[in-house]
Image (cartoon, rainbow, N blue to C red):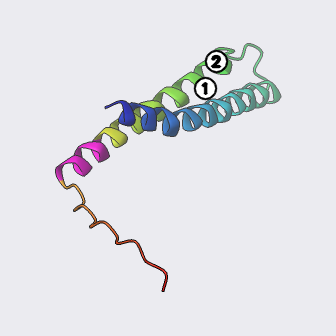
Amino acid sequence: MRDFLMRLLRRTLPVVIALAVLGYLLGEMYLMLSQMNGGNNPDTSARWRAPLMMAGAGMVIMIVFETLFFVIRRRNPLPPTPPRKPELPE
């Protein structure tokens, strides 16, 4: 179980960080475009709401799929590979 949690953390953390950065950029772009189009009072909560929602959604999706893959792999384990015989020099 510890291996699963470490693998989940290793795979989820970069996705969450990338989505948060992308969400921040999208929030800033929304604010800039709303000011350009004559919006006097833009919704400034987009600056923090977009990154949190994107990172949260990405984290949930990664956890669901990693758990699903973990359960599927556990049901159908690979057959053990036979040990290789050491080659002796001639």
Give the left or right position of residue 8, taking residue 14 as reference. Answer: left
- Nearer-the-camera pick, 6 or 32: 6
Q: Nearer the viewer, residue 78 or 71?
A: 78
Q: Residues within 10 Å of mark 2 (few under 14, many from 20)?
A: some
Q: Outermost residue toward the left?
A: 75
Q: Residue 86, position in %: x, y? A: 40, 71
The percent coordinates of residue 31 (x first, y second) are 74, 25
Say whether residue 72 is magenta: yes
Confirm or deny contact between disc 1 and disc 2 (CB under 8 A).
Answer: yes
Q: Which mark is residue 51?
A: 1
Residue at 69% from the left image edge and 15% from the top image edge: 44
Q: Which element carries disc 1, helix, strand or loop?
A: helix
Identify the residue under disc 2.
Answer: 48
Q: Among all residues in the image, which is located at the extreme front?
A: 90
* Residue 70 included in the magenta stretch of the image: yes
| Residue type at numbered disc 1 | Pro
Write the start and end of the magenta stretch as one range: 68-75
Above or below — where is 58 with respect to 75?
above
Quadrant assignment, res 83: bottom left
Q: Quadrant of the N terminus?
A: top left
Give the distance between the C-alpha atoms of the residues marked 1 and 2, in whole angstroms. 6 Å
Residue drawn at point x = 56 percent, y = 22 percent:
52
